[in-house]
Amino acid sequence: MRRFMLSACAGATCLVAGALFAQEAPRLTGPEPFTKESPAPPMQRQVTDDVRRKRNYPDQPPLIPHAIEGYALDLNANKCLACHARKFTEQSQAPMISVTHYQDREGNTLGGVSPRRYSCLACHVPQTGAKPLVPNTFVDMDALVEREPRGR
């Protein structure tokens, strides 16, 4: 009987403690119900100075340094290619898209842009002057190499 009473008291204590701790736990859904529609945050202003920025890491897709509002980009049209395709870069003075955009996944060269690279905005994004939402301690690879002692 004593063992039963001890078990019952331990169980009751756990239930009460669980209820008390649950009241202090942070909500995962935020202050509003997830079904409530809220206005979208304002869009950040795009940087449109046509200055190409340094990339932060190898193979980073370049940022888009110009306005792209109103550009047609669907299955039938890709306004980006009017300047960045291989045959138009001389007259537009825009940088040519990478040769990898003209290759299939096996590395075979194609006559035109590979269908898997046709949608530019899947990798390339307009540049904005947005402030970071969280602190960032990223250090560029070149800066890391410069920090290492040369005497090794």
Image (cartoon, rainbow, N blue to C red):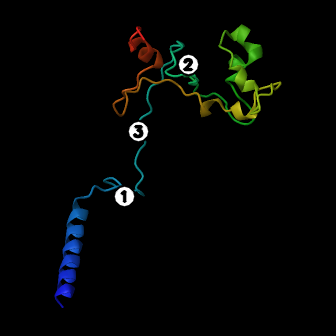
Residue 122: mark: none
Cα separation between marks 3 and 1: 18 Å
Q: Quadrant of the N terminus?
A: bottom left
Q: Secondary structure at mark 3?
A: loop
At x 71%, y 35%, the residue is 116
Marking on residue 33: 1
Along the viewing direction, whichever of 101 and 82 lies nearer the viewer: 101
Picture layout, residue 54 above or below residue 126: above
Q: Position of residue 62 (x, y in %)?
A: 57, 21
CA distance separating discs 2 and 1: 38 Å
Q: Is residue 26 above or below residue 84?
A: below
Q: Is residue 114 visible?
A: yes
Residue at the disc numbered 3: 41
| Amino acid type shown at disc 3 | Pro
Q: For mark 1, give the secondary structure.
A: loop
Residue depicted at x 75% and y 30% = 114
Q: Tag 1 or tag 2, which sits nearer the N-term?
A: 1
Q: Are marks 2 and 3 in contact (CB under 8 Å)?
A: no
Q: In this rendering, would 83 be left or right of 9?
A: right
Which label is found at residue 66? 2
Q: In terms of depth relative to the viewer, which is nearer, 3 or 50?
A: 3
